[in-house]
Image: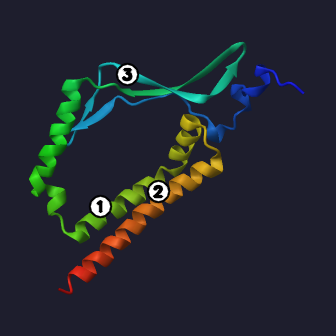
């Protein structure tokens, strides 16, 4: 049986509330020298491979992010270089314990955003719910495994 294009894409009311975005996510903030700034320049639009049908119209716009020009991109790069400070910056000089504490806090905060990130994966790249959840969980596991490897490395290095 041949399927019509009208039957492929869902209507807005056919999407469960837990999977809907209340609105497009237009990311206008960016970080320079530890300061959150607002971008007022060009934006890169982001589209989902999944279209939503509304009457006779179809839409797949899900948001946007800053399309930085050379000047702002170099400013961000210089900011990162300044923070690293040839290995003398705050992060490179933190103890292993301090770095682990930061990463564990990052994991804690990421886990709070799991549903939101999973939903973004579904809409932005068209992954299934199950695959999106697995990808998120694998990422958290990878960070946790990296922390454990760092602890092992630190323990074995301290024996010398």
Disc 2/disc 1 C-alpha distance (Å) = 16 Å
Tag of residue 60: none
User: Percent x, y for residue 26?
Assistant: 43, 28
Q: If the image is split into quadrants, where does the C terminus sit?
A: bottom left
Image: 10 above or below 106: above
Image: 160 above or below 96: below
Disc 2/disc 3 C-alpha distance (Å) = 28 Å
Q: Using the rendered view, name the quadrant where residue 76 is placed.
A: top left
User: Percent x, y for residue 110?
Assistant: 43, 53
Q: Using the rendered view, name the quadrant where residue 92 is placed.
A: bottom left
Which residue is found at the position 60% from the left and 37% from the top? 126
Disc 1 target residue:
102
Q: Give the SS element for disc 3.
A: strand
Disc 1/disc 3 C-alpha distance (Å) = 31 Å
**Is 58 placed left or right of 150 in the picture?**
right
Closer to us: mark 2 or mark 1?
A: 2
Q: Earlier in the sequence, mark 2 or mark 3?
A: 3
Q: If the image is split into quadrants, where does the N terminus sit?
A: top right
Which residue is found at the position 72% from the left and 25% from the top? 11
Asked if labels 3 and 1 touch by Cβ distance under 8 angstroms, the answer is: no
Q: Give the SS element for disc 1.
A: helix
User: Percent x, y for residue 72?
Assistant: 21, 28
Image: 132 above or below 76: below
Image: 157 above or below 9: below
Disc 2 target residue:
139
**Is 50 placed left or right of 37 in the picture?**
right
Disc 3 target residue:
43
**Is 157 placed left or right of 12 in the picture?**
left
Q: Earlier in the sequence, mark 2 or mark 1?
A: 1
Which residue is found at the position 27% from the left and 81% from the top? 155
Q: Earlier in the sequence, mark 1 or mark 3?
A: 3
């Amino acid at each position: 049986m041949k399927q019509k294009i009208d039957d492929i894409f869902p209507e807005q009311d056919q999407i469960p509330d837990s999977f809907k975005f209340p609105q497009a996510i237009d990311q206008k903030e960016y970080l320079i020298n530890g300061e959150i700034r607002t971008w007022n320049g060009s934006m890169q639009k982001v589209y989902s491979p999944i279209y939503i049908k509304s009457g006779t119209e179809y839409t797949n716009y899900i948001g946007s992010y800053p399309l930085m020009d050379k000047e702002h991109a170099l400013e961000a790069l210089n900011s990162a270089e300044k923070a690293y400070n040839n290995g003398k910056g705050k992060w490179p000089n933190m103890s292993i314990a301090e770095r682990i504490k930061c990463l564990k806090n990052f994991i804690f905060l990421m886990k709070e955003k799991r549903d939101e990130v999973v939903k973004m994966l579904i809409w932005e790249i068209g992954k299934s719910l199950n695959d999106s959840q697995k990808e998120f969980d694998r990422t958290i596991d990878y960070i946790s495994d990296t922390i454990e490897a760092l602890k092992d490395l630190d323990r074995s290095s301290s024996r010398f």
